[in-house]
Image: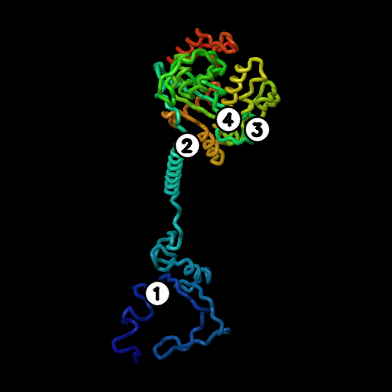
Amino acid sequence: MNDWPEGWSDNNRDPRYGRGSAGAQPEGARVMRQVRRGPAVPPGPRSAYGDPGPAAPPYGAGVPQQPSYVDGRGHDDGAGYDDYDSGYNTGQVYGAPGGRGPGGPAGAPGRGTRPAPNWRRRIKWTAITLATVLVVTSVATYFWADSKLRREVDLSTVIDRPEAGEGTNYLIVGSDSREGMSKEDEKKLHTGGAEGKRTDSMMILHVGDSGDTLISLPRDSNVTIPTFRGSESGKVKGPLGQNKLNAAYAFDGPTLLVRTVEYNTGLHIDHYVEIGFQGFANIVDAVGGVDIDIDKGFKDKWSGADFKAGKQTLNGQQALAFVRTRHAFAASDLQRTKNQQKFLAALAHQVATPSTVLNPFKFYPTMGAGLDSLIVDKDMSLWDLASMFWAMKGVSGGDGKSMNMPISGSAGGNLVWDKAKVKTLVNELNNDEPVTVTSGN
């Protein structure tokens, strides 16, 4: 008697039903992973339809058994529970393309596997980000620094100027201005409390293709102060005749000093830079002091200098005393100009070191101290200022020449320039030729 419904048999039952075999090949020949809930149970009596009846529960049936995987041949794949659990923990769906099941190719990463990082893309975007930050920082720094420059000197008011030559000429002035200093500062820096401003040091820096030249102008130089246009009245005044060079600044400030230097040398001054006592000391302190090798020790109660010979680091107060001292030397003004050149070269070298330029905690305070203290002409740009600075650094490194204005003697206690040498020197500078003239002192 056929136990199946009419028309049904083991051989013609619909492939959608029964044991799940949808193919022509017997199920036992197909390798399929199946979940086995417990140990194999011996077959029990069949039901009326031929299916196995309920099996006797094994020992310990009250405790749930951990599932394991077996293939279609009844063999355990060795993964056990861990393999079963790992698939669900990683979010993989068995049978899905790319999964651990038969749905994806062997060795292909599953959906839960993190893709390998695209290092080329990461490097590209990192470089773009860094470049953007660098550009933004540079532009912001430029405008910040440019806004701090004190463009107060109008060289267009200087009359009867010589023609400009090749290269660029800077007149660099250290004044005895006590601007911003308290009585305590004046006492500490040994500056005194004199009112007004005078020039403590003056230098011409020529920047050109044939080498850079730094020329100190002794403040006691005997020069002619010519006619000039008053900086406040706008009226033509003078001439004031023979006098010390630093008297020109005392009479009418920077524009008369430029007019006097141009008149007595025939050299066109392109830019003017001035710094006072307090600003000079602040720059030195901001950079952390300046290393210098002093050839011979000296003392000076007027400037507060008290130095021993040898290598040492000078702070702002000591540096100001070093560049101002003249009473301790026989050739007072000439030796002082040499010390000033030596120190400014060391300062430029110190500022340009990586430990300063690459350290924002040093770089910005140093720039801030310098720019706050500088007084420049109205046409001075940051690029001009940077060119001046690097030229001074080059001179200190031996790439240029430093000298005093050639002196032939003295008159009434003032130093007299050697006119023949000065003429040759000015011609070489105007034509941007290598300087052959020596100071001879």
Q: Earlier in the sequence, mark 3 or mark 1?
A: 1
> Vertically, is 205 above or below 119?
above
Report if the CB atoms under discs 3 and 1 are less than 8 Å apart: no
Q: Earlier in the sequence, mark 2 or mark 4?
A: 2
Question: What amino acid is found at the position of numbered circle 2 in the picture?
Answer: Lys
Relative image position of residue 224 (x, y in whole percent): 49, 13
The quarter of the rendered structure image containing the C terminus is: top right
| Residue placed under numbered mark 1 in the picture | 27
Marks 3 and 4, how far apart at CA: 12 Å
Q: Earlier in the sequence, mark 2 or mark 1?
A: 1
Q: Earlier in the sequence, mark 1 or mark 4?
A: 1
Mark nearer the viewer, 1 or 4: 4
Marks 2 and 1, how far apart at CA: 89 Å
Report if the CB atoms under discs 1 and 4 are less than 8 Å apart: no
Relative placement, left or right, of 7 versus 60 is left
Relative image position of residue 96 (x, y in whole percent): 39, 66
| Residue placed under numbered mark 3 in the picture | 187
| Residue placed under numbered mark 2 in the picture | 148
Question: What amino acid is found at the position of numbered circle 3 in the picture?
Answer: Lys
Q: Residue furthest top?
A: 420
Q: Is disc 3 surrounded by few (<14), some (14 to 19) or many (20+) residues within 10 Å?
A: few
Mark nearer the viewer, 2 or 1: 2
Q: Is disc 4 surrounded by few (<14), some (14 to 19) or many (20+) residues within 10 Å?
A: many
| Residue placed under numbered mark 4 in the picture | 277
Q: Residue at x 66, y 20 (%)?
A: 327
